[in-house]
Amino acid sequence: MNKLTRLAILVCSFLAVDGLRGDDWWNFRGPQGTSAIKSARVPTVFNEQQGIAWKIELPGKGPSSPIVVGDQVIVTCSGGDKQDVLYVISVDAGSGRELWRQQFAATGNCNCHPLSANAAPTPVSDGRFVYAFFSSNDLACLDLQGNLVWYRGLAFDFPKARNDAGMSSSPVIVGNTIVVQVECQGKSFAAGLDAATGETRWLVDRPQDASWSSPLVLPGGGERPDFVLLQSKGKLSVLQPHDGREVFSVAGQCGLISSASLVGSRVFAPMDGTTAYEVDPNGQLSVVWNSPRLRAATASLVISDDQILSIERTGVLSGFSLADGERKWQERILDADAAQGGFWATPVLVGDHYYFFGQSGQARVVEVGSEGAKVVHSYDFGETLLGSPAVVGDAMFVRGDQHLWKIANH
Amino acid sequence: MKCPFAERRGVLWAGVLRAGMVLLGTTILGTTILGTTLCVPKLESAVVADGSDDLNRAIQVVLAIGHEGVGNGPAVQAMQVLNAATPAQIPELLAAMDQANPVAANYLRAAIESAQRREGEIPIGSIGEYLADRGRSSASRVYAFDLLRRHNAGLAEGLIPSLIDDPSLPLRRLAVKRLLAEAETQADPTAIGTLGYALSFARDVDQITAARDALAKHNIQVDLARQLGFVLKWQIVGPFDHSDEANFETALGPETSLEQIDLTAKYDGKVVDGKPAEVVWKAIQTSDPTGVVNLNNEIGKIKSAIAYAYSEFESAAEQDVVLKIGCINANKVWLNAQLVISEDVYHNGMDPDQFSGTAKLRQGKNQLLVKICQNDQPESWAQEWMFQVRICDPTGKSVLPAPEPAPEQ
């Protein structure tokens, strides 16, 4: 790529970031990576009679979340008898009409747990391009017309980068670098790829232990440059996104599936239960508090302005103090139906309503206060739900193994 | 990519040509000043005048993509041409897929996906001819079939029976799938004939198993292990020590003399309950229809341990084979002392064709040695210690040992 083109793309990307970011949902767990959004107003009642604007069929499975870029809802799927056909699909948010579809053949290992699928990582966007990652370590960059810009087969480069239960770490964008985390018992690495070309900027070895968690961007501000936080089985690391150099690490027992969140300059990491850290300008983390009892299960924590919401496998939802990690209240919100089969999708908090999605397709809307919670609505989507939804404006986009729904009043 | 500097195809081509030639190690005079080169009007008009050349040059750039992102930069520019391809150009793109590595093939696949969304007649005939050419790569023909199915479903469905003996196993799979479905609607003896026919061409474990199960309902028994080429008879020895997962790369017991496996040898095994143990070979034969050998039963439920399994395989001729192992533990496989598979992974699931490697059987006796490493994970789902091995030819058909000669009278 010539330098002028590259420069223009980068300028366009930054303009897009500034101009479009707004309420879009460009990445796993939303704009702040907290799965909480105050401004949206999504129906709290939805069923066949109301609150479902449209429902469309998908060509394949996927625990990945949809993302919303402008008017496009973008979702990845995988299909074929061997989960080796990869899809990236764009749907008009207003009408549910499919705008474009791109498909690829997986270049890496497609084995995964029967419940999961190759389309497990959530795609990420910078508002101008979409970066779709898959369990087979295929990574495609598409423009918003569905045209391929570049493609990488990271397992084509490293065939032992595989996990036969499937991989699910979602990529992040830091500046003009795409950061992917590939941690398994085989070839484990984190890599920074040039967002414009997909060329490798850096690649560092990571612990050879399986992890399904996703990197977290620690955006720069004031004196602090951008950093990226990686969570492995036995440690947390802070890396410089431009060269992959580790500037900080701390040993401990990290969650293997749930991922860390950031509120301001405070990181909430699933480390030894949950540990809150303050990030300094040099990327160093200092412990603010540790709460062994606040232990995220498969779903990541949901963090609002004043509390942390955590749901246990038993169906008990708890509110913990943001200030010290102490439990403030707990409430059983799931009956046997909703808890059946467990849950994988990280819920979302929209205003003061907590939306929960169980593996069996059961959804619950829970009104959350500072002292407790109560279920205000139940709905059965009728198929396996593994992905966390995306929320923009007055709409929530929910994806199942077979369908994509828009929850909205119009 | 909407970039003000990249709207003109001629400009694009300057970049693509330059990058492509640099990639090929060619020196281009006068191209060091990017802006100057990009504004050469002669080049621009010449390139725009010949769309087919544009396409071919872009294809060559994409085909040059290598490992670890090599060639990605030029390919980004080439894709601006390929993404503008028309339906009429699909055959050229398909033809290029035949020479492409899996990553480059996805660039071409994406270009075809964009082309087939455009207005214009899809060249069904050319795509069909491409599909019919069994000399083409499997992946590109599978994609050609997918294209055909999306644009002329009737034609594609009609072709499926002819794919039953196709060298492309994904295409063959379609025909077997059709037969298995048809058999469900048929009565004896037609169903038996259909299933037997499907079984003779099926190569995938799940389809062979499905045919076996269906035939069983018609009181026809199929030796699944034989059909799939599983090795059932083994000599095993162990446990050897594997504390701290330290000995995956350490040669223990029979691994110290790979060229000459001695089945009468005795080895120092793992110290269990404070007692050193001498371990010796033990003959076993698994009765599992998919050849699974459960070492927890055969050697004992021991953590941080290694076992070896040895089998001799008589081949009627020298032949290329694919060794396939399903193993929930870390494992290595040697054929005639040559390492074929090495996977240092624990408790990540198990599938008959989980790991594979190509090898060559020699005529006569062949020695197969497997190393199976158990770690110390305490979780309930991390207690299994087992493996299964099968031998296939390069088309996936089971390779069976040559029959033993009849005893002399």
Image (cartoon, rainbow, N blue to C red):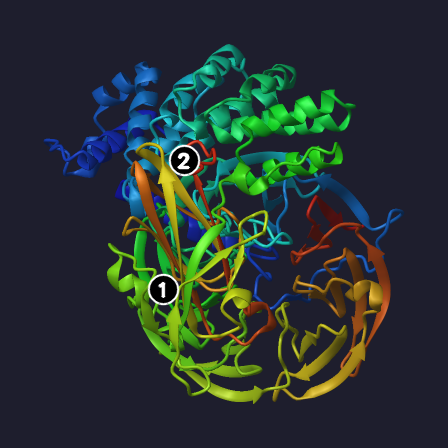
Q: Nearer the viewer, mark 1 or mark 2?
A: 2
Instruction: Tell me the residue that label 2 is attached to.
Output: B402
> x, y percentage for residue B335?
32, 48
SS at badge 2: loop
How many numbered callouts? Answer: 2
- A223 versus A122 height, above or below: below
> x, y percentage for residue B395?
44, 31
Chain letter of disc 2 in the image? B
Q: Which mark is residue A241?
A: 1
Residue at 19% x, 32% y: name it. Answer: B21
- Residue B235 appears in the rendering: yes
Crowd around label 2: few <14 · some 14–19 · many ≥20 (10 Å): some
Residue type at mark 2 is: Ala
Residue at 30% x, 48% y: name it. Answer: B68
Residue type at mark 1 is: Pro
- B122 versus A37 height, above or below: above
Please give left or right for residue A186 compared with residue B217 in the image.
left
Please give left or right for residue A331 compared with residue A87 in the image.
right
Q: Residue furthest top?
A: B125
